[in-house]
Image (cartoon, rainbow, N blue to C red):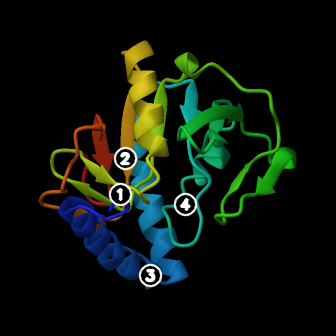
Amino acid sequence: MRNKKTDLQLEKDKIRKEILEKRNNLSTEEVEKKSDLIIQNLEKFIKNAENIMIFMDMKNEVRITKLMELYPKKSFFIPKITDSKNREMKINKYEENELVLHKFGYYESSSIDFYNENILDIVIVPAVVFDLEKNRIGFGGGYYDTFLKKIRGENKKVLFIGICYDFQIIEKVPAEEHDVVLDFVVSESRIF
């Protein structure tokens, strides 16, 4: 009985499946074009930040790693799962020569030199879906919610910015108590 999914989880799964199908059907050209527009919309946040956490994009996700080419003087950090049982992530400084492929298909650092998350000015947050109230549906692991909740408790000035394509924004996401609301969501045509 314990593994039975709730109606809320089933609803999230349905939305996740629908949006991922759309994202998977994007052409490489569409991904590049839309990613460039999203990065332009992020500029006003990035220009005043020093330490930025991004994620290593995979498949048809927004090409957020382009930020590192555009802002070579800024420090970029990437997450690493350090404790699956407790859904914990820590951050490593991005170093291309330390990247290893994770079993889920994205790259993470092989380094065990972790940084204190309090140094972060911005956390760029991935998701499958966002809503107009800045709630999100991720891949269902809960790692980002745990991470964001921890940082928000320690660092009030950090900005949580979700990035996505326009079609990944829906009216209302079925939110749960533990879900963390972001500060901004940025797509190719809007910031809210």
For marks 1 and 3 on the same chain, the one whose residue lies earlier in the sequence: 1
Instruction: Quarter of the image for the C terminus: give it.
Output: top left
Give the mark nearer the N terminus: 4 vs 2: 4
Q: Residues within 10 Å of mark 2 (few under 14, many from 20)?
A: many
Within 10 Å of disc 3 (Cα), the crowding (few <14, some 14-19, many 20+) is some
In front of the other: 45 or 83: 83
Circle 4 or circle 2, nearest the eye: 2
- Disc 2 marks a residue whose amino acid type is Gly
The residue pinned by badge 2 equals 162
Residue 165, percent across and down? 35, 64
Name the image quarter holding the N terminus.
bottom left
151 up-or-down from 17: above or below: above
Sequence order check, earlier mark of 4 and 3? 3
Upstream in sequence: badge 1 or badge 4: 1
Q: Gap in Å between the C-alphas at discs 4 and 2? A: 13 Å
- The residue indicated by pointer 3 is 26
Residue drawn where x is 79% and y is 41% of the image: 95
User: Residue under circle 4?
Assistant: 63
Task: Give the number of the mark in front: 1 or 4.
Answer: 1
Kindly tell me whether residue 47 is visible in this rendering. Answer: no
Task: Check if mark 1's residue and mark 3's residue have beta carbons within 8 Å.
Answer: no
Q: Are marks 1 and 2 in contact (CB under 8 Å)?
A: no
Residue 169 in the figure: left or right of residue 22: left
